Image (spheres, rainbow, N blue to C red):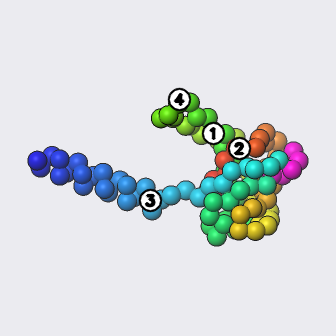
Amino acid sequence: MAAFTVLVAVLFSVSAFCSVKKAVHADISMKINASTAQINLEEPSRFKVGQHVGVYREDCRGGRFSVCTRDRVGSAKISKIHSQKYAEVTMDKDIYFEEGYVIQGE
């Protein structure tokens, strides 16, 4: 019974830590040109104009219980915030990106 109690305590500690360290991210919703994209914001108050962000390609495999991996393809900078839902990012030089890629705060 003591081992079960320790296990439950560890799981609660890990879940509490993960909820505090939640990464700020958004998805690329539209490619405007070769170096600019419009992103769909999840938490608009957490992104600021001029903030540097990472650009990731997300690959999910599997069916109901899919496993996803993120590969960093480069970085970008928040150039404009259009509304609470949308912003614009400018990519660093020579970064290939597509709609659906993930933007994550650094």
Q: Is 90 above or below relative to 85? A: above
Which residue is the site of mark 4? 62
Mark 4 Cα shell of 10 Å, populated few (<14), some (14-19), many (≥20): few
Q: Are marks 1 and 2 in contact (CB under 8 Å)?
A: yes
Residue 19 got which mark? 3
Q: Main SS type for the magenta part?
A: loop
Which residue is the site of mark 2? 100
Give whichever of discs 1 and 2 has the lower sequence position: 1
Give whichever of discs 4 and 2 has the lower sequence position: 4
Quadrant (top left, top right, bottom left, bottom right) of the C terminus: bottom right
Residue stretch rendered in magenta on the structure: 32-37
Image location of residue 76, percent across then percent down? 74, 53
Quarter occupied by residue 82: bottom right
Q: Nearer the viewer, residue 90 or 32?
A: 32
Report, in whole angstroms, how far the alpha carbon at label 4 lies from the one at label 1: 13 Å
Q: Which amino acid lies under the numbered mark 4 shown in the image of this protein?
A: Gly
* Dot in front, 4 or 1: 4
Q: Are marks 1 and 3 in contact (CB under 8 Å)?
A: no
Image location of residue 81, percent across then percent down? 77, 67
